[in-house]
Amino acid sequence: MKNRNVGYLIVGISVVIAIIVWIFNTALKSIVGLSCTHGPACTMYNTIAIQTYISLAIAGLILVIGLFFIFTKESEKVILKTKTIKEKQKKKIDLTGLDKDEKQVIKILQQENGAIFQRTLMEKLEVGKVKITRLLDKLEAKQLIERKRRGMNNVVVLK
């Protein structure tokens, strides 16, 4: 499950807990109102209030955890053999004949130790899916990069 979906699930659980606490609190107040002879000065009212605050604090904590999961970005990891990355960094790449965008792709790949997710590259270049695909197709045809499938993602690797 994605972090965002887990966050929504946790937020939903916290809302359900808060509703249950409210229903339980209402029922307890009516029971105490019927059974306590001291009226509003009865100590049971204070106990109900304390229990309600503790329960709502727990529900609030669960809500905060859910919101954290919703708004945090998942970290992406690429695991590559370090030996091949170092070898690729030593190799000089001829950038003549490349246009401005192609040179930017190569530069970003060199900064990222030779590998990056295609989606991350797209965000760094601030281009769309079509443009990044065409750029990478050109660079693959020139045998400067290679795209490797990792689940639903592509990893762009410097050759």
Image (cartoon, grey):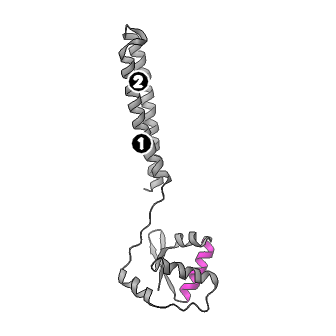
Looking at the rendered structure, which numbered label has been put on residue 62? 1
Q: Residue at x 45, y 91 (%)?
A: 91
Assess whether residue 135 is covered by the magenta stretch: yes
Residues marked 1 and 2 touching at CB (< 8 Å): no
Q: Main secondary structure of the magenta part?
A: helix
Horizontal and vertical percent position of residue 2: 45, 56
Is residue 69 shown left or right of residue 122? left
Q: Residue at x 45, y 52 (%)?
A: 69
Query: Which quarter shows the N terminus?
Result: bottom left
Horizontal and vertical percent position of residue 105: 56, 80
Amino acid at circle 2: Ala
Is residue 80 shown left or right of residue 116? left
Q: In which image quadrant can residue 41 be found?
A: top left
Q: Residue at x 42, y 33 (%)?
A: 56
> Is 158 rendered above or below residue 6?
below
Horizontal and vertical percent position of residue 49: 41, 24
Q: Nearer the viewer, mark 1 or mark 2?
A: 2
Circle 2 crowding by C-alpha within 10 Å: few under 14, some 14–19, many from 20: few
Provide the secondary structure element on which disc 1 rests: helix
Is residue 142 shown left or right of residue 14? right
Provide the secondary structure element on which disc 2 rests: helix
Front residue (pair 141, 92): 92
Marks 1 and 2, how far apart at CA:
20 Å
Looking at the rendered structure, which numbered label has been put on residue 1? none
Span of residues in magenta = 129-142
Amino acid at circle 1: Ile
The residue at which mark 2 appears reads as 49
> Is 17 rendered above or below residue 65?
above
Q: Residue at x 38, y 31 (%)?
A: 54
Assess whether residue 107 is covered by the magenta stretch: no
Front residue (pair 4, 1): 4
Sequence-wise, which precedes: disc 1 or disc 2? Answer: 2
